[in-house]
Image (cartoon, helix red, strand yellow):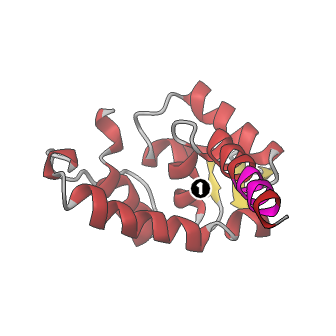
């Protein structure tokens, strides 16, 4: 009986991890969420922080994350007219997991494989971003991918 329960637990864990990576493992999804950890941001601000992402791809990822219940989308009446995105409580609940993944990445990947570190000097994004979102854009060296 115990072996059957373990197999079920393993299957459930595999299913959960598969679903998490199916959503968050898509290119740019994680960086979009990390960018929004500081609070709401307009589409144009997110695009400036992640310059390597095309507007079409950014729009697609934002739509997917909104549909998954991780973000809310709000039309700003302006002027100028714009769209803002914000993490929902479900999206905000990813904060500790993302912090742990960041820590693990520094300790296990970047420390052991220095060639994975960005080689270009950090660029200052042209935005009124918070210090954390500026650091995300700089640390991730997203302009050269």
Residue 98 shows up from this direction: yes
- Magenta segment's dominant SS is helix
Residue 124, x across and y down, in percent: 28, 54
Q: Is residue 109 left or right of residue 63?
A: left
The structure residue drawn at horizontal position 54% and vertical position 50%, both measured from the top left corner, is 30
The structure residue drawn at horizontal position 44% and vertical position 43%, both measured from the top left corner, is 50
Q: Looking at the image, which is closer to me, 114 or 142?
A: 114
Q: Quadrant of the N terminus?
A: bottom right
Residue 75, x across and y down, in percent: 80, 48
Kindly state the secondary structure of the residue where label 1 is placed: helix
Residue 85, x across and y down, in percent: 70, 54
Please count the marks in the image.
1
Residue assigned mark 1: 33
Q: Looking at the image, which is closer to me, 86 or 42?
A: 86
Q: Is residue 95 above or below residue 84?
A: below
Dot 1 alpha-carbon crowd within 10 angstroms: few under 14, some 14 to 19, many 20 or more: many
Residue 88 shows up from this direction: no
Q: Is residue 10 magenta?
A: yes
Task: Place residue 60 in its image quadrant.
Answer: top right
Residue 63, x across and y down, in percent: 74, 38
The structure residue drawn at horizontal position 40% and vertical position 33%, both measured from the top left corner, is 52
Task: Place residue 57 in its image quadrant.
Answer: top right
Q: Looking at the image, which is closer to me, 139 or 20?
A: 20
Q: Quadrant of the C terminus?
A: top left
Q: Is residue 108 left or right of residue 65?
A: left
Q: Is residue 4 magenta?
A: no
The structure residue drawn at horizontal position 45% and vertical position 62%, both measured from the top left corner, is 128
Q: Is residue 10 above or below residue 43?
A: below
Q: Which residues are magenta?
A: 5-13
Name, please, the residue furthest toward the bottom.
96
């Amino acid at each position: 009986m115990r072996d059957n329960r373990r197999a079920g637990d393993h299957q459930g864990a595999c299913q959960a991890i598969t679903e998490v990576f199916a959503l968050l493992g898509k290119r740019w999804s994680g960086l979009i969420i990390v960018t929004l950890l500081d609070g709401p941001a307009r589409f144009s601000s997110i695009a400036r922080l992640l310059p390597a992402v095309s507007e079409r791809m950014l729009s697609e990822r934002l739509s997917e994350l909104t549909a998954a219940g991780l973000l809310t989308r709000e039309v700003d009446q302006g002027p100028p007219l714009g769209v803002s995105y914000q993490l929902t409580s479900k999206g905000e609940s990813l904060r500790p997991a993302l912090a742990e993944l960041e820590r693990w990445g520094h300790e296990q990947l970047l420390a052991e494989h220095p060639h994975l570190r960005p080689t270009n000097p950090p660029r200052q994004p042209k935005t009124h971003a918070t210090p954390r979102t500026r650091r995300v854009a700089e640390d991730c060296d997203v302009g050269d991918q």
